[in-house]
Image (cartoon, coloured by chain):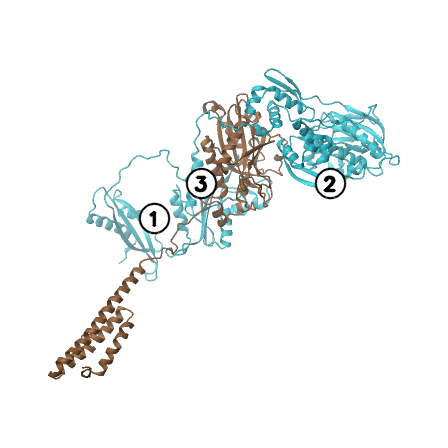
Amino acid sequence: MDHLLPAEILEADRAFPEALAACADLDALLRLKGAYVGREGSHAARLMDLLKAAPKEQKRDLGAAINGLKQGWEEGLTARQTELEAAKKRLNALASSWDPALPPPVPARGALHPLNRLMDRLVEVFRPLGFHVEEGPEVETEAHNFDGLNIPEDHPAKASSDTFYLAAHPELLLRTHTSPVQVRTLLRVAPDLHRLGGIRFLAPGRVYRKDEIDPTHSPMFHQVEGMLVGHGIGMQHLKGTLEYALRALFGPHTEIRLRPSYFPFVEPGCEVDVSCPLCDAQGCRVCKGSGWVEILGAGLLHPNVLRHAGIDPEEWSGWAFGMGVERMAMMLSQTPDLRLFFENDQRFLRAMGGLD
Amino acid sequence: MWIERKALAAEIPAAAALDTRQLCELLAALGFPVDGVASREGGDVLDVDITANRGDAMSHRGMAREVAAKLGQPLTPLAPPPVAEGAPKVPVRLESPACPLYATALLTLNPGLGGGGTPVEAQAFLRALDASAKGLPAVDASNELLHRYGHPTHAFDADRIRGAVTVRWAVAGEKLVTLDGVTRTLLAQDLVIADEAGPIALAGVMGGDGTKVTEATRRVLLESAWFDPKTVRATARRHSLHTDASHRFGRGADPAMAAVARDLLVDRLRTWAGATLEGAWTAGALPAPAAPVTLSEAMLVRVAGEPLTLAEAAEALTRLGCAVVAGSDALAAQPPTWRHDLAIPDDLAEEVLRLRGYEHIPSVLPPLEGPPQRLSPDYLLRRALARRLAHLGFHQTVTYGFISPEADAAFAAPGNAPEGRTLANPLGREYSVLRGTLLSSLKEAAEQNLRQGTREVRLFEVAPTYSSGPAGPEERFTLGLAWGGTQGGEDYLSPARPVREADLRGIAQDLGLAVIPEVRGLGEGLFGFEAPVADLPRPGERIVSTFRPFSRFPSVERDLSLLVDLGQSYGALATAMRAALPADALQDLRCVDVFRHKSLPEGRQAWLIRLRFQVDRTLMGSEVDGWVASALAAAEALGAKLRT
């Protein structure tokens, strides 16, 4: 029956599948639909005109042929529309969804300074033993920094080559250790000592010594002082406390070792070593193969220190220790250069200090 | 101090059985840690750390005494051939109590009559200790004796001494050229050895150049004295002259060794230099021995933490050279002449524990006698502040408390004069002023970070700043914060933008600072502020606050887009609008957007003002409309127009 149909229609019908496939979106499909089955000017409209004008005896056959063509086109168009609509839906869904692997907005993260973090940790370690925190000024009097600590008046540490003094106030200096906090605290609590049942505290803080800046020296550094005054306090209590604290800090298998030493404000005095926390006392670069690292100086309070504060050394006794925070931080972190702690590079701070 | 193992073993033969490591451990356990071991002259030499209180240990003999006491083994007897004393050949006058004892001898050196000079063993010994032999037996022998036995001696060229020898205080302004060739101007507090022409030595510190022993010296006058430690320390420090002699006299030499050292020196000069003794004599006498020290059993047990007996203590102290008299509940110990550090019972207790070994001290937690004290609110506030800022993305810095006057002046308060905060002896000008501001230090750290290529720098520090007061610098803890660079832009949802001043004001507001501090420009795209920590709100004492009712009815929000002049004050506008609104219903009024664009009339900008109302009932649209109209009217009175 194809002879009844115009050649260009037959050609359009042959081209239909390809044209349909070429429709990439619904707009294109709509245009194709207009061209084939639209109300006016389409192939279907032309065929209807043809049918109207056809001789009666051809109408039946021609009608069937036209219907066949139109039905084929409409089915194709509908199928393609469903396909394109589904594709668009998929795209829309994708457009409103995001790959969870894309980096999400993360709140900015800062860090505590590693030295502060270590000092905070020390306070936490001693807290369960009833220690609180005492603080004192960094600008101190000679009396508190030296004299109250049984340091002889001609001690070399007093020299202006070792200690910073204030120009306008020759009696004032930058404290060379946190020990003056001992003096201040004892003077303050002395009248109340019986009611308080002794005293025990840590004194973390910044101290100053006249050292040139190099990889192992800094004119400003940090110490944590510890002090306890009570009845019948002896070396066993110093050892017991430090063993508890250093195990809490370095791990339950840590051993400690006391060695005799000398500081004017304690008697007996000692240095305290811990089994090397980095090599489990097997011997490494940090402990120089010995398995031990020196961690702090300590001792029983010299009776003159108690007397200076008006506390009777016949009744009361106690101990004190002093620990270098940088030294411990460098040892634990194996940081090669002390100056890194004062450069405040954010990369260093984030890596070393972090957040609890 | 260097200790040669061989020479130590010569004093305490039992030490020869210990290898170097065992010896190091033993010394460390006695309080003399070994900092290093060197191999010199065919043997090990130990670098022993000796604390300042133990002048007596600063020699091989001194160290041997400690080892002998610990091991319970005898020392090699020290018995130089006795030197008979006679009448003084040169008068010696002691005019100061700082030198109570002065032993001396006069010898003629006869290099021709035997004596091959300083023996090779003595030379090797000195080299092993990082000292060197001078080839002059009188000098080398004195030096060798010092290291071996700890007592400093000196030899003068006797022919260059004029008249009597006097130990006296210097006359202020007197001059002395010391052995190191330096001319010293003396003070009245310097003790000197003088002849009739003037000072010939700084007592206990260094000899004089004019009377030194040389190749040409034929007669020597020896000095083996005892000088007051404090006097020697002061002179050494005043003249910055720290010598082997001043080190030992300054920490307390053994007065009983004065005569012994003189005898040893005479003996060496006889054998090393063929010297003949012309005479030996002593001026003065041994200083009075220190009083015995009493140690009670109660104290011993308290310090040791275990039931040590007085008998055990007496045994240990006797081994260390004390003369001990034990009673029933206390002992009295007379320290030996070389131990100036044993003055109080605590010292004796320490000696007992030290000799016994600190490893035997038991480990006991101290009992709590009273309730623990709380952490102070100040301390807690600072700790919480640091953690909060770290969680807000800021990095805590630690910077030096002293800065340059210029850095200080850049940000410190104008009234805070730096003079009262200036150091007398700073490391340098850049570290000379106790800072009145944290901002200079933060600026430096921030700029350093930005130079390193950091996109965004967020720093803070909580540290004291200082203000000059009449009694000295006054300290107060200060919070400083610096923020700069580019914010955001690190993910697909947060646009990148430069950090703005307003960002810092937001932090200050979020921290609840009582007074919002001025945000300062620290540099290109870098801002900072600082505020006293005391301005931060303190956490309330009450854990849970008193209940205050709040409305459960929904709130109503309305936005007003206003065209206002570019110069319009937001504060004035917000105040005027608030005043026009019922205070009990207005929950919040804030500008949530600022729009500036060329599409707006020239000189104008658009502010989007958001109003939020809430009362304890359901709000009617009409009443909210009324309020919004009042707010708009108040804004219009200030020249604002509703943007359409």
Residue lying at 76% horizontally and 23% vertically, measured from the top left: B284
Q: CA distance from mark 3 to mark 1?
A: 25 Å
10 Å crowding of disc 3: few (<14), some (14-19), many (20+): some
Q: Amino acid at mark 3?
A: Pro
10 Å crowding of disc 1: few (<14), some (14-19), many (20+): few
Q: Nearer the viewer, mark 3 or mark 1?
A: 3
The subunit carrying tag 1 is B
- Visual hue assigned to chain A: brown
Q: Label 3, on which residue? A: B532
Query: In the drawing, what numbered circle is on residue B42?
Result: 2
10 Å crowding of disc 2: few (<14), some (14-19), many (20+): few
Asked whether A153 or A232 is in front, the reply is: A232
When asked about the image quadrant of residue A52, the answer is bottom left
When asked about the image quadrant of residue B59, the answer is top right
- Visual hue assigned to chain B: cyan
The subunit carrying tag 2 is B
Say if mark 3 contacts mark 1, CB within 8 Å.
Answer: no
The subunit carrying tag 3 is B
